[in-house]
């Protein structure tokens, strides 16, 4: 830690609790993390003479738990960028953090195409965990009693974790920007080449004129796939009667539009291409019957 960081006043305990709440919102339903984090705050604010060391141990366990839960060995080890470091039995903390941010996306794609520096994002968390490790071991010369230092240690760890989650969102946002045209074309191709019951049942002959993608979300990036969901509107022409009926003024054609949702995948090794047979479109036609 540099002198400038040491001179900065760390957040108060109430502010740290708010940061802890923000962290827990990133991992909803994780009872273990919530319990241990509550214990960390409780002992950190207590009068226990080794409260700093106990608090550091709890925060370290929370961080380690999250890294292992979101980046298990079985997934990290299958990434194209993974290489086991010497004298390790599996992925390092930094490799787990990188996986959380970018999954199995190739490093050169993330660096050169998405323009993201994954190592810079993960570095503060790794440094904070190194300091937590040192503070965990209670020795005569390592007892941590200074309240500011304890709060700074907690703040650095929580901030590092939150930065990783924010970087994950940034990575996913950049991925879907890169795939925007491919997503549009993949959905349109599905409308044109597949018979969707929700549209087919509306008329004698339903023709898709166009569609508009209003929202794209990357659900997650794992060691093999980018999982994507897109929402939008499909514009259709509903024909009632045959072409002969229309010529004889016995049929009708009307235009309408309906919301849809589509799910699809892209391979992390070819992140600029949508896998055609993974595209599944669902149209909400309830407005037609209202």
Image (spheres, rainbow, N blue to C red):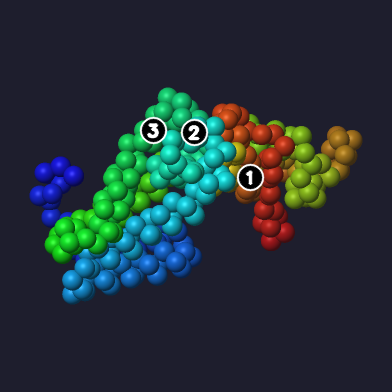
The percent position of residue 129, horizontal first and vertical second, equals 31, 50
Of marks 3 and 2, the one in the foreground: 2
Q: Earlier in the sequence, mark 3 or mark 2?
A: 2
Q: Could you tell me which secondary element the residue under label 1 belongs to? A: strand
Where, by quadrant of the figure, is residue 120 drawn?
A: top left
Q: Is residue 84 above or below residue 54?
A: above
Q: Which residue in the rendered view is the most extreme toward the bottom?
A: 47
For the question of whether residue 138 can be seen, the reply is yes
Looking at the picture, tell me which residue is in the foreground, 251 or 155. Answer: 155
Residue 48 lies left or right of residue 34; in this view the side is left
Q: Is residue 19 above or below residue 234?
A: below
Q: Mark 2 — residue?
A: 83
The percent position of residue 216, horizontal first and vertical second, equals 53, 43
Where, by quadrant of the figure, is residue 256 drawn?
A: top right
Disc marking residue 116: 3
Q: Residue at x 38, y 55 (%)?
A: 63
Disc 1 versus disc 2: distance between alpha carbons?
32 Å
Of marks 1 and 2, the one in the foreground: 2
Q: Residue at x 65, y 37 (%)?
A: 187
Q: Residue at x 21, y 68 (%)?
A: 50
Q: Mark 1 — residue?
A: 263
- Location of the C terminus by quadrant is bottom right
Q: Earlier in the sequence, mark 1 or mark 2?
A: 2
- For label 1, the crowd category at 10 Å Cα-Cα, with few meaning under 14, some 14 to 19 and many 20 or more, is many
Looking at the picture, tell me which residue is in the foreground, 257 or 264. Answer: 264
Looking at the picture, tell me which residue is in the foreground, 230 or 59. Answer: 59
For the question of whether residue 154 can be seen, the reply is no
């Amino acid at each position: 830690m540099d002198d400038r960081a040491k001179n900065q006043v760390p957040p108060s305990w109430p502010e740290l609790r708010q940061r802890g709440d923000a962290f827990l919102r990133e991992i909803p339903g994780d009872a273990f993390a919530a319990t241990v984090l509550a214990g960390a705050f409780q002992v950190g604010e207590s009068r226990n003479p080794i409260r700093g060391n106990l608090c550091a141990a709890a925060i370290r366990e929370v961080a380690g738990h999250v890294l292992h839960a979101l980046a298990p060995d079985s997934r990290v080890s299958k990434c194209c960028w993974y290489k086991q470091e010497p004298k390790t039995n599996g992925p390092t903390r930094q490799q787990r953090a990188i996986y959380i941010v970018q999954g199995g996306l190739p490093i050169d794609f993330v660096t050169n195409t998405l323009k993201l520096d994954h190592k810079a994002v993960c570095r503060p968390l790794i440094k904070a965990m190194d300091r937590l490790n040192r503070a965990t071991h209670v020795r005569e010369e390592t007892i941590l009693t200074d309240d500011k230092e304890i709060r700074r240690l907690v703040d650095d760890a929580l901030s590092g974790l939150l930065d990783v989650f924010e970087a994950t969102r940034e990575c996913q946002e950049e991925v879907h920007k890169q795939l925007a045209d491919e997503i549009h074309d993949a959905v349109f191709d599905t409308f044109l080449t597949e018979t969707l019951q929700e549209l087919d049942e509306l008329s004698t002959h339903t023709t898709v004129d166009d569609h508009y993608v209003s929202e794209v979300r990357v659900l997650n990036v794992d060691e093999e796939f980018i999982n994507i969901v897109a929402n939008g509107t499909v514009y259709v022409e509903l024909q009632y009667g045959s072409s002969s009926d229309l010529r004889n003024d016995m049929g009708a054609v009307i235009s309408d539009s309906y919301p849809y949702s589509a799910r699809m995948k892209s391979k992390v090794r070819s992140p600029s291409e949508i896998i055609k047979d993974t595209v599944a479109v669902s149209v909400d036609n309830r407005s037609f019957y209202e």
